[in-house]
Image (tube, rainbow, N blue to C red):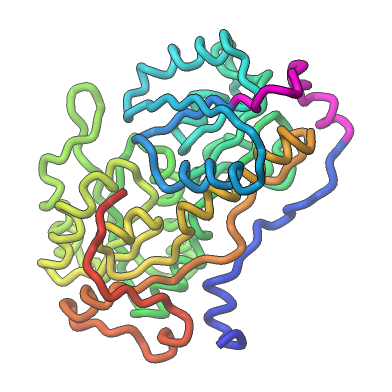
Amino acid sequence: MTHDPIRRRLLSAAVAGAGAASAPSLLAATPRPAARDPQRPFRIYAITFRGMTDVEKGFEEYFASRKIPVQITYRDLNREATRMPGFLDEIRATRPDLVYTWGTSVTLGVVGPHDAVQAQHISDIPVVFTLVAAPVQAKIVADLARPGRPVTGVTHVVPTDAQIRAISAYRPFQTLGVLYTSTEKNSVVVLDEIRRLGRERGFHTVERSFRLDAQRKPTADGAAELVRELKDAGAQWLYLPPDSYLGTLAEGVIIPTAMEVGLPTFASTEQLMQAGALSGLVSRYYNVGQFTAHKAEQILVEKAAPATIPVEALKRFSYQIRMSAAHRLKLPPPLPMFNYAELITGEAVGGG
């Protein structure tokens, strides 16, 4: 029901200040794209973090539906930061019309923090990012409404306070468990926000991070035990942050262990929801990709300066509930949720 106040709060959001007018100084600071042959496609250099996802599918199909000719060169970091210098060299050598970056780690590797840009970073070619949980906290941009440098994009994670309200609407809690990767900026900034909300709203946070090996890479060793520790520490929910490494273990280890110990899980991303979480307030990856392509169209076709294009999230989110998990946990959703939640009747479909 459209008049349901919970639905309005949980399923609609807009980034504050989006669409603000651009300042002349920002326009002057934004590099102009190189002269381009109007007969050739726009050239996009795309760097992914863990291979192709539905984000890229939505990105590509947007251009096809709009009949905008593009030539996309894909490169995959495959979670290995040592590949980045080679990609940056290739960008400088080929001079694409636009660079597409997937996730916080990739984006920071390409453009650097806004207050600490170094010589190796790309600063003279427009960059559009996607799947970045907290662009301001990660210092990719100083302001969502006015990025101030040739970088803009789309954030996919529903505002943290809306997620906390969504969890409470399903089942009130006093202690929230969080499992995360300490070397992933996405997870760290979201965890900081959860801690702040906990102080404001009076709930306690218990946390565990994946172990790191000698090269400071996360390892699956003891991952199931970390879930059990969170349950033993009093966690009433297990919050799954926008964490790429967690995503690799969610379906096979993390969520099954949580189900085993009777700990309900809440997903921050569609990938984690697909991995089998009980519930989640998420943006669909395909739609995120389409919105990211819209940002690229503004730069490539409309010749808008990326420094003046607001960083935004989708305006509508999906509150999803996996009914098989609810049945196993003996935790049916409250009746009002049937008016607005998307009920998933099947089992997990994979981490994506």
Q: Residue at x 15, y 72 (%)?
A: 262
Name the one closer to the observer, 125 or 286.
286
Residue 142 visible in the shown view: no
Residue 328 point in image, percent of width and height? 16, 77
Image coordinates of residue 81 in percent, x first then y, are: 37, 22
For image coordinates 77% across by 26% down, the residue present is: 30
Image point 56% across, 17% down: which residue? 121
Answer with the quarter of the image where residue 319 lies.
Answer: bottom left
From the top left corner, tell me how far across and down residue 102 is, in percent.
47, 36
Q: Residue 235 versus residue 257: which sits nearer the camera?
A: 257
Q: Is residue 246 magenta?
A: no
Left or right: residue 270 versus residue 196 is left
- The magenta segment: 24-43
Q: Is residue 125 left or right of residue 327?
A: right
Q: Nearer the viewer, residue 140 or 345?
A: 345
Quadrant housing the N terminus: bottom right
Q: Kindly tell me whether residue 104 is visible in this rendering.
A: yes
Lateral position of residue 208 relative to residue 321, left or right: left
Quadrant of residue 344 within the rendered picture:
bottom left
Residue 87 percent coordinates (x, y):
46, 16
- Relative to 63, residue 320 above or below: below
